[in-house]
Amino acid sequence: TIFEGKGGLQEAGCDALTFLATMSDSHVQIAELGGTNFILKAMTAHVPSEGVQTKCCGALMRLAKNVDNHVQIASLDGIQAIVNALNAHPQSAMVQEQGYAALFAMAENPDIRVQIAAQG
């Protein structure tokens, strides 16, 4: 999209998705409408941005509250994107907190837990 190079807009978009995902069943709709893919594209395009990584990890953590989203996040290389964010920002308490919270939420699924252990 025309906004892929705009880190600030990507950060704001992920922040909005995080907020929306706190509402009852919206995390399912967000994933169904491509929100997970949007989040992961933003993470890949803006690895050096602490703000983007924090907001994206937070959004993934919220989406991972739904068990069905675990598989989608993992199948789109979301675990690796989170691990990359953690490795790129080892001194950022916010990235570390949000990233590990996302992994923790996904680790509820035993199959995903194995994938996390293999990548992290």
Image (cartoon, rainbow, N blue to C red):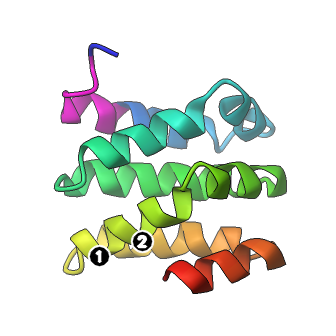
Marking on residue 83: 2
Q: For the point 75% across and 55% down, which residue is it? A: 71
- Asked which quadrant contains residue 107, the reply is bottom right
In this rendering, the count of numbered labels is 2
Identify the main secondary structure in magenta: helix
Answer above or below: position of 42 versus 98: above
- Asked which quadrant contains residue 95, the reply is bottom left
Tell me the amino acid under the disc marked 1.
Answer: Asn
Tell me the amino acid under the disc marked 2.
Answer: Val
Is there CB contact under 8 Å for labels 1 and 2? yes
Image quadrant holding the N terminus, namely top left
Image spot of residue 57 (x, y percent): 45, 57
Can residue 43 be seen here? The reply is yes
Q: Which residue is mark 1?
A: 87
Q: For the point 27% across and 13% down, which residue is it? A: 2
Residue 21 on the magenta span: no
35 or 16, which is in the foreground? Answer: 35
- Asked which quadrant contains residue 4, the reply is top left
Report helix, strand or loop for mark 2.
helix
- The part of the chain drawn in magenta is 3-12
